[in-house]
Amino acid sequence: DGGITQSPKYLFRKEGQNVTLSCEQNLNHDAMYWYRQDPGQGLRLIYYSQIVNDFQKGDIAEGYSVSREKKESFPLTVTSAQKNPTAFYLCASSMNSGVKEETQYFGPGTRLLVL
Amino acid sequence: DQQVKQNSPSLSVQEGRISILNCDYTNSMFDYFLWYKKYPAEGPTFLISISSIKDKNEDGRFTVFLNKSAKHLSLHIVPSQPGDSAVYFCAASRRGGRRALTFGSGTRLQVQP
């Protein structure tokens, strides 16, 4: 059963703490993305990676870091520098086949709350 | 600067009627448009897409229309069903550069039985 998994479903962060959100896909997709959703707003791009060992900042990268050591995995770390981390975090992937019209498929999301 | 706008935060229709969700964009570099459906606390689910070389794409009860000159697209759902109740997001991607999506703020559709 191919898909994208995100864990945990809920995550609590204490002040000054770094936390890491997991995203794994078995769709054999090259490209992966992290978005953030705030209440009443659309999704905003944090980071994206079009190929292993390469990633680019999105529109709201400050306070976040990522790595892409494996094709299947794209973990997101929310650092203590992110002053307003409470949000719903969504991971997505796409084939990155070179065809410009590509659909992105999303995982179930992780809700991050600050204690 | 919001490049993709969904100006109606909510829409309520009766079961069996047509639902029309609208989306406007400002960036003329966008050339691929998608609609996603989202339930609370879940990831968005892809519904339907349209390339800028077309003006209509249909898939079952869902039809997307694109008016490039007006920079406007719409999603029609006919007939609407109670299970269609969700938040619908319009998204766009542009030729060249990154393929990440730019999303609108969403429209909450409520289909009344």
Image: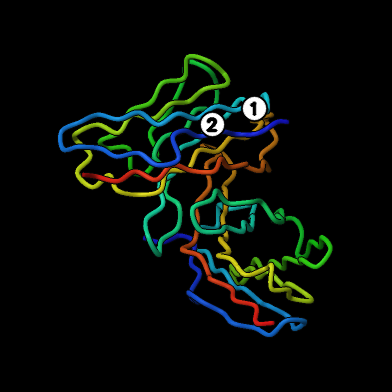
Q: Tell me the residue at 40%/31% (across/down).
A: A21
Q: CA distance from mark 1 to mark 2?
A: 8 Å
Is residue A23 or residue A49 the one in the foreground?
Answer: A23
Residue density around tag 2, few if under 14, some if 14–19, many if 20 or more, within 10 Å:
many
In the rendering, at what x and y percent does residue B64 appear?
Answer: 72, 65
Is residue A81 or residue B70 the one in the foreground?
Answer: A81
Q: Are marks 1 and 2 on the same chain?
A: yes
Please, what is the three-letter code of the amino acid marked with disc 2? Answer: Met
Q: Quadrant of residue A89?
A: top left
Is residue B22 or residue B54 the one in the foreground?
Answer: B22
- Find numbered disc 1 in the image and state the secondary structure of the residue it sits on: loop
Q: Quadrant of residue B16?
A: bottom right
* Chain name for mark 1: A
* Chain name for mark 2: A
In the rendering, at what x and y percent does residue B50 appear?
Answer: 72, 56
- Find numbered disc 2 in the image and state the secondary structure of the residue it sits on: strand
The label shown at residue B86 is: none
**Residue behind mark 1:** A29
The C terminus of chain B sits in image quarter: bottom right
Please, what is the three-letter code of the amino acid marked with disc 1? Answer: His
Q: Tell me the residue at 62%/73% (across/down).
A: B21
Vertical comparison of A42 with A80: above or below: below
- B87 left or right of B81? left
The N terminus of chain B sits in image quarter: bottom left
Q: Tell me the residue at 65%/78% (across/down).
A: B111
**Residue behind mark 2:** A32
